[in-house]
């Protein structure tokens, strides 16, 4: 580039000043008023256009002093002489790389008084070169508004070059700048502020320059005794407090789930009435009218499809409220603070703060969360995060928690659901710590800084848009899964188990004689130590292996009762299904249904989220790690469930004794 | 312009900030408080560190992998995806400290 780009002294069409006129280069950071000052000084005669041989736009004009004219060049904005853009490369070339004779005769470094550290870094580099330099200090009014006062004399003394305060819009300081530049041009070229490079490497050099600037600014700039503390900073002092921050975060999340479970109740009542009443009756009447009222068909259509689709639709109030509350938190700026709070936990388990993103996504759905681990550059960190994501409690599991919490823990359902999320976080931390101290002992981690957005009132349009997009995504995924799973379960329940004696006609088989019961019954003994070794309960876990969205719908089919998802949260606790579940859990656990359901919920949280998640894991980390993760999750889930039930029995036994 | 700091005066602003980041300081305001530097100096130094490649900066939303957003229902409004309605400034920016290779 040096050989192709004409220097400042070579004649070309942009130049308007007489040949031989001293060349003054205006350089400075973007948005400090450099071009405004240049235009003020050169007036109407300036020429704008690309510098010959480049695509870099410059301005050139004649700056008339009282006794002579100067050739003024407006360089593009540059923060430093270390180029990160073509504009900065151009500045470096014409200021630093061309031979001394072709360089400008003087530099006017334009710096903003309100951003001195940033805009004077360029000066620190320029002062390492033998140049005549004048600093034009702009934006003094903005600095004054912030209570800052810059003493140009002291600053000039420390920077060892003239500093002139100017306001190019009002024209103040222009005469002094003109006089100062004239005097500077008449003076010999000053020595560079130091001999040799500023440091042995880029870091040391930059540190030395900032230290030099800091020394000057400490003396020349006075700030108000008490720095203005913004509203966001005041709020952050509380929300990001090392001890209070996590407590507030947990309290906020508890409030989200409490509101979700209580506010959704009356809304679900409306949908309940619709599905249990008019829709089911209309479907039955329609089938009867066309002569299709065979139990096989009415079972599939009314109990299966309408029940299944109804399940999906009645999730709407629950999910909409939760998504809206989370969107409110995001839009207000709080979720960014949650990232800071949880970052401490990330560090604890050896993951970078970036891992927060896929893990948070995982609380919505594990499948995109696993894809989102691609943001992590380190392969081991990515693998570890992929293995931890299944422990994030996805929104599909929420519906099961709500139903079971209302049935077995009436009055404190919100707290129970919240507890499941706390357990989810604990599982992530504990599993992360276990992996960190076994498989990945040498995994490094990077420090991070969060640039937090200012708190703001949430925008209704954005909150509504985010809520709708997430709700639509949930319904789209869950809808397809539930319809398919309901149809498969219906088929398995419609077929008799091998060896069943007098099971009845196909389509009207007693549930306990069905193929579904036989298959679920094979696995049931495994869960006897956890207190829920009964085929209807284990069958739902098998269905849940495919997708958690279908757990309640499969119970409704198993017990052949109305799906209670269409009822209010309170009503769910007293529905037919609730009664059946209470009986099943009580029978399977030997009279300890609360302990058994707690163990069931923990198992539901910890075991494989769904086959789609396994597919995503397979794609990201291969079959070996997917298989290892699957076995690990099943084993951990079983151990935890057994521990909850047996531990609970032990404690209640001790209390009883 | 700056408040008294626990760091010795011979340590420059960039070394002070790098040390604070390694110590786990996680916000710009906290960096300013910890180092005793003016927040504007902190911003200037962090920008410089980004330019030197010591620190990588990215918005969380913008960091979603292409495939990662594929299954995400909020991809159109999360602020990070191309064509998103929400401004990217809403999300937190991660600045990750890296060690420079010797001699840089």
Image (cartoon, coloured by chain):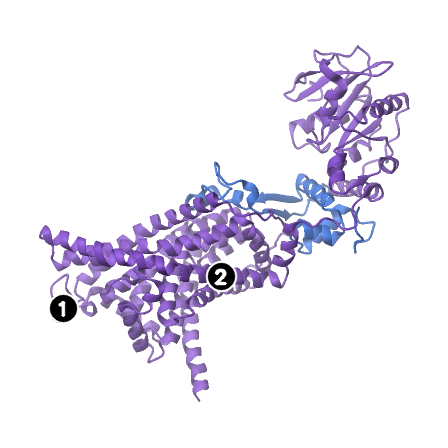
Judge left or right: residue A637 versus residue A40: left
**x, y percentage for residue A593?**
35, 76
Chain identifier for the purple-coloured part of the image: A
Q: For residue A338, which quarter of the picture? A: bottom right
In the rendering, at what x and y percent does residue A173 appear? 81, 27
Left or right, residue A257 beside residue A72: left
The numbered mark at residue A503 is 1
Residue at the image position 71 percent from the left and 12 percent from the top = A12
Mark nearer the N terminus (2 vs 1)? 2
Q: Are marks 2 and 1 on the same chain?
A: yes
Q: Residue furthest bottom?
A: A657
Residue drawn at x 85%, y 13% is A68
Neighbours of disc 2 within 10 Å: few (<14), some (14-19), many (20+): some
Image hue for chain B? blue
Q: Quadrant of residue A602?
A: bottom left
Q: Which residue is mark 2?
A: A255
Q: Is residue A264 visible?
A: yes
- Give the percent coordinates (x, y) of residue A153: 87, 35
Separation of residues labelled 2 and 1 (CA atoms): 49 Å
For the residue pair B29 and A222, the one nearer the viewer reads as A222
Rendered location of residue A656, percent (x, y) = 43, 87
User: Where B28 sits versus A239, above or below?
Assistant: above
> Would residue A272 be found to the left or right of residue A343 on screen?
left
Dot 1: chain letter: A
């Amino acid at each position: 580039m040096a050989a192709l780009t004409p220097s400042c002294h070579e004649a070309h069409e942009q130049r308007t000043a007489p040949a031989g006129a001293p060349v003054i280069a205006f350089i400075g950071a973007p948005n400090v008023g450099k071009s405004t000052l240049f235009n003020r000084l050169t007036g109407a005669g300036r020429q704008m256009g690309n510098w010959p041989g480049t695509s870099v736009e410059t301005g050139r004009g004649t700056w008339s002093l009282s006794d002579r004219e100067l050739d003024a060049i407006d360089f593009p904005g540059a923060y430093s002489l270390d180029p990160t853009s073509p504009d900065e490369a151009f500045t470096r070339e014409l200021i630093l790389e061309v031979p001394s004779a072709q360089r400008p005769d003087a530099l006017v470094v334009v710096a903003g008084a309100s951003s001195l550290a940033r805009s004077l870094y360029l000066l620190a580099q320029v002062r390492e070169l033998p140049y005549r330099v004048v600093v034009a200090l702009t934006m003094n009014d903005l600095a004054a508004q912030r209570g800052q006062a810059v003493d140009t004399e002291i600053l000039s003394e420390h920077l060892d070059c003239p500093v002139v305060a100017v306001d190019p819009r009002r024209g103040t300081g222009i005469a002094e700048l003109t006089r100062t530049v004239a005097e500077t041009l008449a003076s010999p070229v000053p020595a560079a502020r130091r001999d040799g490079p500023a440091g042995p490497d880029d870091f040391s050099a930059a540190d030395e320059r900032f230290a030099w600037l800091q020394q000057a600014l400490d003396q020349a700039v006075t700030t108000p005794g008490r720095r203005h503390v913004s509203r966001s900073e005041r709020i952050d002092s509380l929300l990001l407090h090392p001890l209070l921050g996590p407590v507030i975060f947990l309290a906020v999340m508890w409030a989200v789930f409490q509101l979700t479970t209580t506010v959704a109740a009356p809304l679900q009542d409306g949908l309940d009435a619709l599905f249990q009443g008019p829709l089911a009756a209309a479907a039955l009447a329609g089938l009867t009218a066309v002569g299709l009222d065979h139990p096989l068909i009415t079972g599939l259509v009314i109990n299966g499809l309408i029940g299944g689709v109804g399940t999906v639709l009645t999730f709407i109030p629950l999910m909409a409220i939760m998504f809206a509350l989370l969107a409110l938190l995001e839009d207000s700026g709080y979720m960014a603070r949650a990232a800071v709070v949880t970052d401490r936990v990330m560090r604890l388990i050896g993951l970078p703060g970036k891992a927060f993103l896929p893990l948070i996504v995982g609380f919505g759905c594990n499948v995109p969360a696993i894809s989102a681990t691609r943001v992590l550059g380190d392969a081991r960190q990515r693998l570890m995060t992929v293995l931890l994501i299944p422990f994030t409690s996805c929104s599909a599991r929420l519906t099961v928690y709500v139903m079971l919490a209302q049935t077995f823990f009436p009055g404190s359902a919100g707290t129970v659901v919240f507890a499941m999320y706390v357990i989810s976080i604990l599982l992530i931390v504990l599993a992360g710590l276990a992996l960190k101290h076994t498989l990945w002992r040498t995994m490094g981690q990077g420090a991070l800084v969060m640039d937090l957005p200012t708190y703001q009132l949430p925008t209704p349009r954005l909150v509504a848009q985010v809520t709708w997009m997430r709700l639509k995504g949930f319904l789209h995924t869950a809808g397809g899964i539930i319809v398919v799973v309901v149809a498969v379960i219906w088929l398995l329940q419609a077929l008799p188990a091998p060896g069943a004696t007098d099971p009845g006609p196909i389509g009207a088989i007693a549930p306990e004689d069905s193929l579904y019961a036989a298959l679920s019954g094979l696995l049931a003994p495994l869960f006897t130590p956890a207190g829920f070794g009964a085929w209807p309960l284990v069958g739902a876990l098998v269905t849940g292996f495919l997708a958690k969205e279908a757990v309640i719908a499969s119970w409704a089919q198993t017990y052949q009762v109305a799906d209670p998802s269409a009822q209010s949260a309170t009503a769910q606790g007293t529905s037919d299904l609730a009664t059946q579940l209470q009986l099943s859990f009580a029978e399977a656990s030997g009279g300890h249904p609360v302990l058994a359901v707690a163990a069931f919920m923990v198992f539901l949280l910890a075991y494989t989220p769904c086959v789609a998640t396994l597919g995503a894991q397979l794609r990201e980390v291969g079959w070996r790690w997917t298989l290892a993760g699957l076995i690990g999750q099943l084993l951990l889930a079983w151990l935890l469930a057994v521990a909850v039930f047996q531990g609970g029995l032990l404690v209640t036994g001790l209390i009883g004794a | 312009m700056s408040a008294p700091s626990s760091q010795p005066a011979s340590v420059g602003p960039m070394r002070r900030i790098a040390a604070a980041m390694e110590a786990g300081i996680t916000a710009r305001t906290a960096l300013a408080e910890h180092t005793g530097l003016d927040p504007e100096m902190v911003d200037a130094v962090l920008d410089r560190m980004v330019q030197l490649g010591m620190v990588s900066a990215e918005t969380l939303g913008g960091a979603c992998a292409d495939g990662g957003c594929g299954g995400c229902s909020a991809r159109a409004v999360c602020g990070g995806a191309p064509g998103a309605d929400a401004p990217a400034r809403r999300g937190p920016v991660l600045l990750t400290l890296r060690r420079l290779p010797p001699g840089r």
